[in-house]
Image (tube, rainbow, N blue to C red):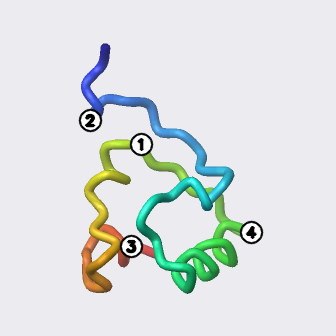
Amino acid sequence: MKPKILSKPRYITNLDELKGISQSDLAEAKKVAEKFPFMANDYYLSLINWDDPKDPIRSVR
């Protein structure tokens, strides 16, 4: 089994799969995703602190 850090990035096609994201952030992300596909691997998604609006990874938009 590969370490999570080396897992293959995947397109997130259903943003409702993201755990911990607020409804307002989810609505904003869906607007962006209509024009720009989003790719991330599980490792980077696990680093996001959805409770911190100033989280540097969360704020990459």
Residue at 31% across, 43% down? 43
The reply to whether dot 2 and dot 1 touch (C-beta < 8 Å) is: yes
- The span from disc 4 to disc 3 (Cα, nearest Å) is 17 Å
Q: Is residue 47 above or below residue 36?
A: above
| Residue on which the image places disc 4 | 34
| Residue on which the image places disc 2 | 5
Identify the amino acid type marked 2: Ile
Quarter location, residue 23: bottom right
The reply to whether dot 1 and dot 4 touch (C-beta < 8 Å) is: no
Residue 14 in the image: state x and y as whole percent: 66, 54
The reply to whether dot 3 and dot 1 touch (C-beta < 8 Å) is: no
- The span from disc 1 to disc 4 (Cα, nearest Å) is 20 Å
Q: Residues within 10 Å of mark 3 (few under 14, many from 20)?
A: few
Mark closer to the chain start, 1 or 4: 4
| Residue on which the image places disc 1 | 41
Viewer-proximal residue among 19 and 55 = 19
Residue 45 in the image: state x and y as whole percent: 37, 53
